């Protein structure tokens, strides 16, 4: 059955639509932190549909909210008043940390970042954008143009002039050997130098933890230091929280809060986990920025009632059950367990991350050379052992990405770590 579906997939879908595994699987249902494929095999899910199933599979509170809303009305567009959309927007503005905030809902993180770019370039009257090396911001024409990861940027054409800044990757690059304070100072000087060679940019867009880039991150405080330079010139700061928002990093509710010394970003984008699998994205911005557009705009599917009901139920569950605290506690145990394993496997270059957002970068033993073949082999071995994980990284896709639902238990963390240990040891 699966082979038949794979053949049909290849007949009607693009060649560039990536599939995991030598023998791709069809996931048919899930519960909690587990999913099952069409052959009846059970897997512990450490990737959550690319960090999208944030709380749990088939979470009763969310499925009931979706079912109840579907029984009333599924959709009406933003041309009509929409109570669930207003309710969720009120909750998000309160949690955002941005004064006088407004929210615009979209259907994805790509669309959210696209909207943020529209707002920033319109507000600043500039189409120059600063972005981070190794970054990923989506698959639309504008977001591909600001993505600093060659593996996910299929064209050099862009409506924007993009300039790439150092700092998103701590362990590689010309400043990798510096201490944290020196690293930040060097990146700030690089930014100042860059700004001396270009027309005034609209904004800097940055992921607090780079997702597709392999869960890399700068030292805490880097973007706060950048903010001082940006603020001097009126340049906006856009925090791409599509993967880091809602407490996944454990230490903070928003990833930008690790860099919040000089205040919140001007614009925050979000998506993925807030809908727990439903298509929800959005932009938060100060009112003066959000309201800068001088033409009509709507969203046909952004903020539709059924996705807003899911988002409200999911956010309520997350807050009431302190899943941020759980990500901090269980994620801390998991990363220490994986670091202990990594210390015994020569192919493991680094185990990094925070909360339930963990990356394991692989390299050829005794070198600093990325090893994508090893990463692919570990992915396959983990799947054979009953564990689903992801891949990423700007250096030949050599990082394993681990991001389970945030309700992960200690026992499940230990189960996943044991499977990962076996998978990593299998490549020695």
Image (tube, rainbow, N blue to C red):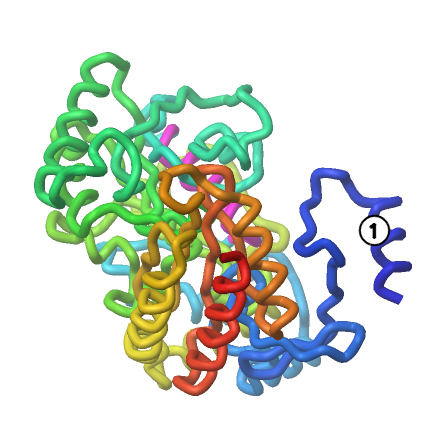
Q: Is residue 322 magenta?
A: no
Tell me which residue sits at (41%, 64%) in the image: 89
| Quarter holding residue 384 | bottom right
Q: Position of residue 335 (x, y in %)?
A: 33, 68
Q: Nearer the viewer, residue 213 or 86?
A: 213
Residue 407 visible, this orientation: no
Q: Nearer the viewer, residue 5 or 91?
A: 5
Whether residue 370 sits left or right of residue 290 in the image: it is: right
Whether residue 165 sits left or right of residue 144 in the image: it is: left
Whether residue 23 sits left or right of residue 379 in the image: it is: right
Mark 1: give few (<14), some (14-19) or many (20+) Cα within 10 Å.
Answer: few
Q: Main secondary structure of the magenta part?
A: helix
Tell me which residue sits at (36%, 43%) in the image: 366
Q: Position of residue 239 (x, y in %)?
A: 32, 47
Above or below 151: residue 310: below
Residue at image mark 1: 9
Above or below 93: residue 54: below
Tell me which residue sits at (37%, 39%) in the image: 367
Residue 266 visible, this orientation: yes
Q: Quadrant of the N terminus?
A: bottom right
Q: Position of residue 139 (x, y in %)?
A: 57, 39
Tell me which residue sits at (41%, 39%) in the image: 135
Q: Nearer the viewer, residue 261 or 282?
A: 261
Secondary structure beneath dot 1 equals helix
Whether residue 412 sits left or right of residue 62 in the image: it is: left
Which residues fall within the magenta stretch? Answer: 106-121
């Amino acid at each position: 059955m699966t082979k038949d579906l794979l053949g049909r997939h290849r007949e009607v879908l693009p060649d560039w639509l990536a599939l995991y595994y030598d023998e791709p699987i069809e996931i048919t249902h899930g519960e909690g932190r587990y999913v099952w494929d069409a052959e009846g095999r059970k897997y512990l899910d450490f990737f959550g549909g690319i960090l999208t199933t944030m709380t749990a599979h088939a979470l009763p509170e969310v499925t009931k909210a979706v079912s109840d809303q579907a029984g009333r009305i599924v959709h009406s567009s933003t041309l009509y008043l929409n109570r669930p959309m207003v309710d969720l927007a009120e909750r998000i503005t309160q949690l955002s940390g941005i004064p006088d905030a407004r929210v615009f809902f979209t259907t994805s993180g790509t669309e959210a970042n696209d909207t943020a770019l529209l707002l920033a370039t319109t507000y600043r009257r500039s189409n120059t954008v600063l972005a981070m090396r190794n970054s990923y911001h989506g698959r639309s024409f504008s977001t591909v143009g600001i993505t600093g990861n060659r593996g996910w940027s299929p064209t050099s054409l862009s409506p924007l002039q993009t300039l790439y800044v150092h700092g998103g990757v701590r362990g590689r690059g010309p400043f990798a050997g510096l201490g944290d304070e020196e690293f930040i100072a060097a990146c700030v000087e690089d930014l100042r130098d860059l700004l001396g060679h270009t027309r005034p940019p609209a904004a800097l867009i940055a992921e607090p933890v780079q997702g597709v880039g392999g869960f890399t991150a700068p030292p805490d405080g880097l973007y706060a230091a950048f903010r001082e330079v940006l603020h001097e010139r009126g340049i906006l700061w856009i925090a791409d929280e599509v993967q880091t928002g809602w407490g996944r990093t454990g230490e903070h509710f928003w990833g930008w809060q690790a860099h919040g010394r000089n205040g919140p970003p001007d614009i925050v984008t979000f998506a993925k986990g807030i809908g727990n699998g439903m298509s929800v994205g959005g932009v938060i911005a100060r009112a003066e920025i959000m309201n800068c557009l001088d033409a009509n705009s709507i969203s046909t599917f952004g903020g539709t009632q059924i996705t807003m009901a899911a988002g409200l139920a999911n956010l309520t569950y997350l807050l009431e059950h302190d899943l941020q605290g759980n990500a901090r506690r269980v994620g801390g145990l998991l990363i220490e367990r994986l670091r202990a394993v990594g210390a015994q496997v020569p192919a493991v270059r680094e185990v990094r991350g925070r909360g339930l957002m963990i990356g394991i970068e692989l390299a050829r033993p005794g070198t600093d050379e990325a090893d994508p073949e090893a990463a692919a082999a570990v992915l396959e071995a983990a799947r054979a052992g009953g564990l689903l994980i992801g891949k990423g990284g700007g250096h030949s896709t050599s990082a394993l990405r681990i991001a389970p639902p945030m309700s992960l238990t200690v026992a499940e963390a230990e189960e996943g770590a044991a499977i990962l240990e076996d998978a990593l040891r299998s490549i020695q």
